[in-house]
Image (cartoon, helix red, strand yellow):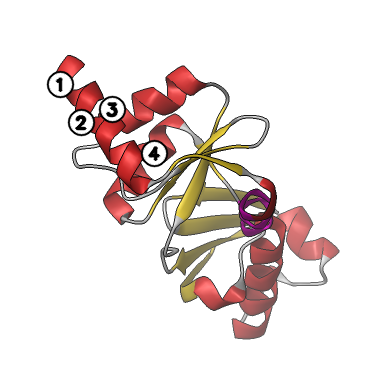
């Protein structure tokens, strides 16, 4: 099954071969089969079932396309390979950041607002819940929300 994340939506695609391997017949795909595939897609993506808000399934002649709409997290973390890329993301925000900057082998920015999460996703990679948990346990805080807001102000003035 191929899985792609698009914002707060997870897209899962199962072709004819995938459906056959699971014992599903194309003409008899029902709610049970869609729910089984949805659960598997969430597991593969590392997302908790609790965030699932809606499922849309589109059976095709020899495949199945499933959209899993997720509730946005209260806070989302994004990975940046270097500090300049993280600072570019901070500078791209239209309002002062609502998150923090952390370090654990590379830089991480968090955001609490969906608009800021969308901007940060253009510059960095979103973390799955397991990675977020590791970061929050073992990461080092570089700048808290207040300090990150001051840095954002300086970057906006000089940008």
- Image coordinates for residue 25, horizontal then vertical, percent: 73, 72
**Front-lying residue, 138 or 23:** 138
Q: Is residue 13 highlighted in magenta?
A: no
Please tell me how crowded label 4 is: few (under 14), some (14-19), or many (20+) other residues with Cα within 10 Å.
Answer: many
At numbered mark 3, what does the secondary structure look like: helix, strand or loop?
Answer: helix
Sequence-wise, the earlier of marks 3 and 4 is: 3
Name the residue that disc number 1 marks. 157
Q: Residue 91 — which label? A: 3
- Asked where in the image residue 21 lies, by quadrant, the reply is bottom right
| Whether residue 159 can be seen here | no
User: Spatial distance from mark 2 to mark 4, Cα to Cα?
Assistant: 17 Å
Nearer the camera: disc 4 or disc 1: 1
Name the residue that disc number 2 marks. 153
Sequence-wise, the earlier of marks 4 and 1 is: 4
Q: Residue at x 61, y 29 (%)?
A: 106
At numbered mark 4, what does the secondary structure look like: helix, strand or loop?
Answer: helix
At numbered mark 2, what does the secondary structure look like: helix, strand or loop?
Answer: helix
Q: Is residue 2 above or below residue 108?
A: below
- Image coordinates for residue 67, horizontal then vertical, percent: 49, 63
Q: Quadrant of the N terminus?
A: bottom right
Q: Is residue 24 above or below residue 5?
A: below
Q: Residue at x 82, y 71 (%)?
A: 23
**Front-lying residue, 157 or 66:** 157
Q: Are marks 2 and 1 in contact (CB under 8 Å)?
A: yes
Name the residue that disc number 4 marks. 120
> What secondary structure is the magenta-colored segment mainly?
helix
- Is 52 on the left-hand or right-hand side of 151? right
User: Spatial distance from mark 2 to mark 1, Cα to Cα?
Assistant: 6 Å
User: Spatial distance from mark 2 to mark 3, Cα to Cα?
Assistant: 9 Å
User: Spatial distance from mark 4 to mark 1, Cα to Cα?
Assistant: 20 Å
């Amino acid at each position: 099954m191929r899985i792609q994340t698009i914002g707060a939506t997870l897209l899962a695609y199962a072709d004819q071969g995938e459906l056959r391997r699971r014992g599903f017949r194309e003409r008899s795909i029902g709610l049970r089969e869609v729910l089984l595939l949805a659960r598997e897609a969430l597991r593969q993506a590392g997302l908790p079932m609790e965030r699932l808000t809606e499922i849309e399934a589109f059976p095709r002649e020899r495949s199945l396309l499933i959209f899993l709409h997720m509730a946005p997290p209260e806070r989302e973390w994004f990975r940046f390979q270097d500090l300049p890329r993280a600072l570019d993301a901070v500078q791209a925000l239209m309002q002062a950041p609502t998150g923090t900057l952390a370090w654990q082998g590379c830089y991480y920015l968090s955001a609490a607002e969906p608009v800021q999460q969308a901007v940060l996703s253009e510059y960095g990679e979103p973390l799955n819940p397991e990675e977020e948990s590791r970061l929050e346990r073992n990461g080092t805080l570089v700048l808290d929300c207040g300090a990150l807001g001051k840095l954002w102000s300086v970057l906006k003035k000089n940008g």
